[in-house]
Image (tube, grey):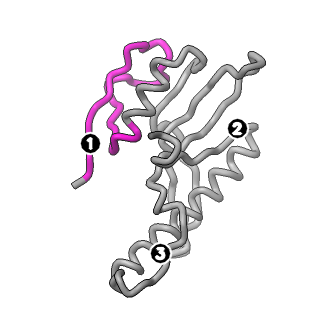
């Protein structure tokens, strides 16, 4: 069962959008929301507020990818930097391997997820490069 909870920012003035509509789908997203809300170097942030078109490798149709976060942060040199941030389990960032411990059905589902994620992230990377934004993927390895 997926984890799902609302997050209510304390620093509402930093949040772009309706601060009552933030629904975290993982503890990692919730932890990142708390970090964004409390970090003095985060100037503004939003949750699931942009749509990036991408071509799905599964049906060869255009779909929309909605990244988790958009963040404006002040760097060490006081230069403001904009980031698009996706929070994902580490295992979804690596191509699955078929082993004897994994059923063919599970492998196929994991491969489909991986391929779709790759298409989304390629489109996000292109979008970000065109708009002078950095795209990053954070996993539990960075968030723990």
- Residue tagged 1: 4
Q: CA distance from mark 3 to mark 1?
A: 25 Å
* Place of residue 93 in the rendered image (x, y in percent of width and height, measured from the top left): 53, 61
Q: Is residue 61 magenta?
A: no
User: Quarter-wise, where is residue 19 in the image?
Assistant: top left
The secondary element bearing badge 1 is classed as loop
Question: Given contact means CB atoms under 8 Å apart, are the residues at marks 3 and 1 in contact?
Answer: no
* Place of residue 52 in the rendered image (x, y in percent of width and height, measured from the top left): 58, 50
Vertical placement of residue 97 versus 53, above or below? below
* Place of residue 11 in the rendered image (x, y in percent of width and height, measured from the top left): 43, 13
Provide the residue span drawn in magenta: 2-29
Density class for disc 1 (Cα within 10 Å; few <14, some 14-19, many ≥20) is: few
Residue drawn 78% across and 18% down?
A: 77
Density class for disc 3 (Cα within 10 Å; few <14, some 14-19, many ≥20) is: some
In the rendered structure, the answer to whether residue 75 lies left or right of residue 68 reads right
Q: CA distance from mark 2 to mark 3?
A: 28 Å
The secondary element bearing badge 2 is classed as loop
- Residue tagged 3: 111
Q: Dividing the image into 4 quarters, which one contains the C terminus?
A: top left
- Residue tagged 2: 133
In the rendered structure, the answer to whether residue 77 lies left or right of residue 59 reads right
Density class for disc 2 (Cα within 10 Å; few <14, some 14-19, many ≥20) is: some
Residue drawn 21% across and 55% down?
A: 1
Residue drawn 59% across and 64% down?
A: 119
User: Quarter-wise, where is residue 60 in the image?
Assistant: bottom right
* Place of residue 111 in the rendered image (x, y in percent of width and height, measured from the top left): 47, 75
Q: Is residue 26 magenta?
A: yes
Instruction: Please state which of residues 89 and 101 is positioned toward the viewer in this rendering.
Output: 101
- Which label's residue is closer to the chain start, 3 or 1? 1
Q: Main structural element of the magenta stretch: helix, strand or loop?
A: loop
Task: Please state which of the two labelled residues, at mark 2 or mark 1, is closer to the viewer.
Answer: 1
């Amino acid at each position: 069962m997926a984890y799902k909870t609302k997050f209510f920012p304390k620093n509402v003035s930093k949040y772009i959008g309706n601060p009552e509509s933030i629904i975290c789908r993982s503890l990692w997203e919730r932890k990142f929301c708390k970090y964004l809300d409390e970090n003095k170097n985060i100037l503004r942030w939003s949750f699931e507020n942009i749509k990036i078109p991408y071509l799905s490798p599964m049906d060869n149709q255009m779909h929309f990818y909605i990244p988790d976060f958009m963040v404006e942060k002040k760097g060490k040199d006081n230069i403001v930097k904009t980031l698009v941030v996706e929070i994902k389990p580490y295992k979804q960032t690596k191509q699955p391997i078929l082993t004897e411990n994994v059923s063919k059905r599970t492998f196929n589902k994991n491969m489909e997820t991986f391929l779709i994620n790759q298409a989304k992230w390629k489109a996000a990377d292109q979008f970000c490069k065109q708009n002078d934004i950095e795209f990053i993927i954070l996993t539990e390895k960075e968030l723990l």
